Image (cartoon, grey):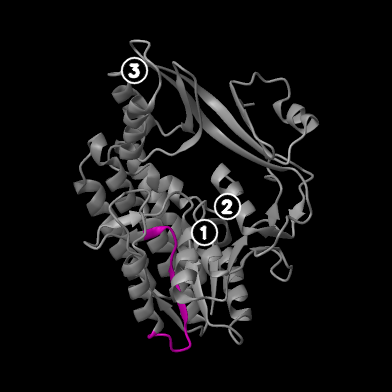
């Protein structure tokens, strides 16, 4: 058994879905497949604007909702012009979305819960269309709701997997294998009480790893629009280098720092069972790509660059000039945990504690408001967090390009810098 994961770019149009189907079809004879699919294109970004409590109202909300529907109906119609069944399934999903948007509470305290209930419809819509299309091609496909497979706690927007419950659900699924493809959603799960949860932004990779771990899969393949694991984002660099092989520990480090190729939690379950992770291009599916596994070194060895945009740097200081010690840190991290805000970089001195986080306005504004009741808080916006593995000074100078460095951390192999966005 192998697990394939297709991200939003690989299914963002009718032609892209046809290409994805060809890749799946080419592996049918020799492999049992579990296929994990993300929302189509930029659907998640659109749905984020429809979450109740977000400041998109009136005509703007209606316009976004029409865009969502027209986009998916257009792809479904192009793939299956006469298939009324898939249109009926989409009608039901869209009606469910509308009901949620009309009835969920709009106060800021429910934002994370609301987010998971609404944004999950992207994956439900994409897999509904793709499952019907694969079946129309004669590819025997079993559509399966990931919310019945991956069980989490109620930590919304960053659901923590209940591995025992999930393994039990997937053991039952394995008994249903009868030669067909199993197609399910990435990114989403559910609590034991059936409330929808998500696994963190871009969490479809993690979904694939969870399924592979619990099913004892031979491998996981993530199909991307790049030829493999590159040493830098090609949006920033024209001379990127493909990493042919990488050890698990290096991949975990890079994902933690924000490498966009894989979700940070993806590698651990695969390493625990020695399952290799392949990164291959859906544009050139015959090419080998990259592999993450039981290797000792990166090959080839080269500096690796990770850029995180839209960062905010918060500097937090006690009002009475007491030390930033364990008691104050406990309060700060408690608030971060309650709001589900992940720290990308941190540094403290005697009287100040600085954290760099993604600038999510709905959450950061609440964090600042609560911190200000106990601390003095200053912040800088429009920042970029740069991480360089295997750095040298010439590489650092090239990246900084004269920008002021607001915060810097350096270890033997890793350099991190916070600088104004170019």
Q: Looking at the picture, how far across and down is residue 38, in whole percent?
A: 48, 60
SS at badge 3: strand
Image-based side of 16 in relation to 164, left or right = right
* The quadrant where residue 92 appears: bottom left
Q: Is residue 54 visible?
A: no
**Residue at the spot 30% in from the left edge and 60% down from the top edge:** 190
Callouts 1 and 3 close, C-beta under 8 Å:
no
- Binning the other alpha carbons within 10 Å of mark 2 as few (below 14), some (14 to 19) or many (20 upward) gives many
Q: Looking at the picture, how far across and down is residue 360, in whole percent?
A: 42, 34
Q: Looking at the picture, how far across and down is residue 197, in whole percent?
A: 32, 55
Callouts 2 and 1 close, C-beta under 8 Å:
yes
Whether 377 is drawn above or below 29: the answer is above
SS at badge 2: helix
**Residue at the spot 34% in from the left edge and 12% down from the top edge:** 319
Residue indicated by mark 3: 375
Q: Nearer the viewer, residue 406 or 54?
A: 406
The C terminus: image quadrant: top right
SS at badge 1: helix
Residue indicated by mark 2: 252
Q: CA distance from mark 1 to mark 3?
A: 37 Å
Residue indicated by mark 1: 268
> Does residue 182 belong to the magenta stretch?
yes
If you read the primary sequence from the N terminus, does the residue marked by circle 1 or circle 3 appear first? 1
Q: Looking at the picture, how far across and down is residue 394, in whole percent?
A: 80, 30
Whether 31 is drawn above or below 144: the answer is below
Q: CA distance from mark 2 to mark 3?
A: 34 Å
Q: Nearer the viewer, residue 100 or 365?
A: 365
**Residue at the spot 30% in from the left edge and 36% down from the top edge:** 57
Which range is magenta? 175-188
- Binning the other alpha carbons within 10 Å of mark 3 as few (below 14), some (14 to 19) or many (20 upward) gives some
Image-based side of 177 in relation to 91, left or right = right
């Amino acid at each position: 058994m192998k697990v394939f994961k297709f991200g939003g770019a690989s299914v963002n149009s009718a032609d892209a879905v046809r290409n994805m189907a060809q890749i799946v079809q080419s592996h049918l004879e020799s492999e049992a497949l579990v296929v994990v699919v993300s929302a189509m294109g930029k659907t998640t970004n659109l749905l984020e604007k429809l979450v109740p409590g977000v400041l998109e109202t009136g005509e703007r909300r209606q316009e976004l909702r029409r865009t969502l529907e027209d986009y998916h109906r257009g792809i479904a119609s192009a793939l299956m012009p006469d298939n009324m069944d898939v249109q009926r399934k989409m009608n039901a999903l869209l009606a469910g979305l509308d009901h949620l948007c009309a009835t969920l509470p709009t106060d800021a305290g429910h934002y994370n819960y609301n987010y998971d209930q609404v944004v999950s419809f992207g994956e439900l819509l994409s897999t509904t269309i793709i499952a019907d299309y694969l079946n129309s091609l004669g590819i025997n496909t079993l559509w399966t709701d990931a919310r019945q497979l991956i069980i989490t706690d109620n930590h919304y927007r960053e659901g923590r997997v209940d591995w025992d419950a999930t393994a039990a659900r997937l053991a039952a699924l394995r008994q249903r294998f009868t030669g067909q493809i199993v197609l399910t959603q990435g990114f989403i799960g559910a609590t034991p009480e059936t409330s929808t949860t998500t696994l963190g932004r871009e969490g479809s990779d993690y979904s694939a790893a969870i399924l592979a771990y619990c099913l004892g899969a031979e491998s996981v393949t993530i199909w991307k629009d790049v030829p493999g694991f590159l040493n830098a984002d090609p949006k920033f660099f024209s001379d990127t280098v493909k990493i042919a092989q990488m050890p698990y520990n290096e991949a975990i480090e890079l994902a933690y720092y924000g490498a966009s190729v894989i979700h940070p939690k993806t590698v651990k379950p695969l390493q625990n069972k020695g399952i290799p992770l392949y990164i291959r291009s859906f544009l050139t599916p015959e090419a080998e790509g990259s592999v993450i596994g039981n290797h000792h070194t990166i090959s080839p060895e080269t500096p690796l660059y990770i850029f995180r945009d839209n960062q905010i740097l918060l500097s937090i200081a006690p009002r009475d000039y007491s030390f930033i010690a364990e008691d104050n840190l406990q309060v700060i991290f408690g608030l971060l945990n309650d709001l589900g805000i992940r720290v990308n970089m941190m540094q403290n001195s005697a009287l100040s504690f600085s954290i760099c986080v993604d600038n999510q306005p709905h959450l950061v504004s609440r964090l600042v408001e609560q911190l200000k009741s106990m601390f003095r808080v200053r912040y800088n916006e429009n920042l970029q967090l740069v991480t360089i593995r295997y750095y040298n000074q010439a590489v650092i100078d090239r990246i900084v390009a004269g920008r002021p460095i607001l915060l810097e951390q350096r270890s033997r192999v890793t350099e991190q810098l916070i600088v104004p966005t170019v």
